Amino acid sequence: MSAITTHILDTARGRPATGVPVTLEMKMVNEWRELAKGVTNSDGRIPHLLPEHNAINVGIYRLTFETGKYNAANEEPSFYPYISIVFEIKDPDQHYHVPLLLSPYGYSTYRGS
């Protein structure tokens, strides 16, 4: 399993959000460095965002979800063309699961397990 995972639930439609492009980046001194890209599967997940052999480090990370593309593909309105979630990793030996609960005019996130 990837050290960082995510999934998206479309709360307005009551099902996983499939086909959402997601980018994972790490904050460097003055810029963000892209670590991985993926697209959510039929369960709304990206189980192998980072290859298993890729270790993570202490630092600040960002997941960016291209929600505007997802909503357009489903002919739904979209207030957020993309959603970025910035989080900090203090213990690289742990697994970090960052889910997104999505609707056309709102979203929430939390640290999952």
Image: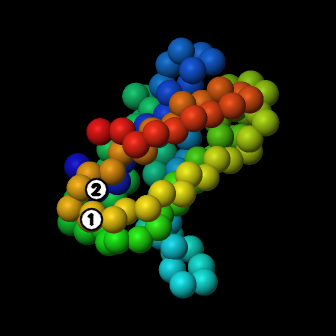
Which kind of residue does numbered mark 1 sit on?
A: Pro
Taking the image as shown, residue 45 lies to the left or right of residue 20, namely left
The x and y percentages for residue 51 are: 28, 60
**Mark 1 residue crowding within 10 angstroms, few (<14) / some (14–19) / many (20+):** few
Say which residue appears at 68% left-offset and 47% top-offset: 82
Q: How is the image coloured?
A: rainbow
Viewer-nearest residue: 22 or 111: 111
Q: How many marks?
A: 2
- Which of labels 1 and 2 is toward the front? 1
Viewer-nearest residue: 46 or 83: 83
Viewer-nearest residue: 73 or 113: 113
Q: Is residue 17 visible?
A: no
Taking the image as shown, residue 37 lies to the left or right of residue 4, namely right
Say which residue appears at 36% left-offset and 45% top-offset: 97
Residue 34 vs 29, above or below: the answer is: above
Circle 2: element type: loop
Which kind of residue does numbered mark 2 sit on?
A: Ala
Say which residue appears at 43% left-offset and 29% top-offset: 42
Residue sitting farthest toward the top: 14
Q: Are marks 1 and 2 in contact (CB under 8 Å)?
A: yes
Badge 2 is on which residue?
3
Residue sitting farthest toward the front: 90
Circle 1: element type: loop
Say which residue appears at 60% left-offset and 83% top-offset: 30
In space, the residues marked 1 and 2 are separated at their CA atoms by 8 Å
Q: Earlier in the sequence, mark 1 or mark 2?
A: 2
Which numbered circle lies on residue 92?
Answer: 1
The x and y percentages for residue 9 are: 50, 27
Quadrant in which residue 36 is drawn: bottom left
